[in-house]
Image (spheres, grey):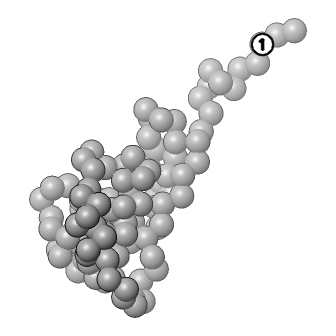
Amino acid sequence: MVVYDRARHTAHCLNRPAAIVWRHANGVHTVEQIARLVNGGEPTVWLALAALERAHLLDQGIDSESTAAAMPATESDEPAPSVVSLNVATPDAMRSDPL
């Protein structure tokens, strides 16, 4: 999934676990509920939330102490959540000045 941040002119490519967390991290679903959707357990959700927060894709920040405590080492068949960001030039930035 690609998410475009209009304010920062940045495109973010989210892999499947990160996209699922992003879609469901709306204040209605619990971490436990989202974990069942990503098949990676709660540590996967917390990793995704941390990545989404670093990319400025969450309306509210997450509690870093709760996040660290909730991320024990775990193995999963699901890939780790990933958010790759790319700054995108605006049309104004693409214009060159005539000589």
Question: Is disc 1 surrounded by few (<14), some (14 to 19) or many (20+) residues within 10 Å?
Answer: few
Left/right placement of residue 96 relative to residue 15 reads right
What x and y, as percent, mark residue 10?
Answer: 52, 42
Quarter of the image for residue 75 reads bottom left
Give residue 69's quadrant in the image: bottom left
Q: Which residue corresponds to the image point at 17% horizontal and 76% vertical from the top-left?
A: 32
42 in relation to 54, above or below: below
The residue drawn where x is 47% and y is 35% is 8
Residue 36 appearing in the image:
yes
Q: How many marks?
A: 1
Quarter occupied by the C terminus? top right
Location of mark 1 (residue): 97
Q: Where's the N terminus, which quadrant? A: bottom left
Secondary structure beneath disc 1? loop
Q: Where does residue 65 sit, x and y in percent of width and height?
A: 26, 64
Q: Amino acid at mark 1?
A: Asp
Q: Is residue 58 above or below residue 69?
A: above
Q: Is residue 38 visible?
A: no
Q: Residue drawn 48% across and 60% down?
A: 83
User: Where's residue 70, x and y in %?
Assistant: 25, 75
Residue 37 drawn above or below residue 85: below
Q: Residue at x 46, y 44 (%)?
A: 4
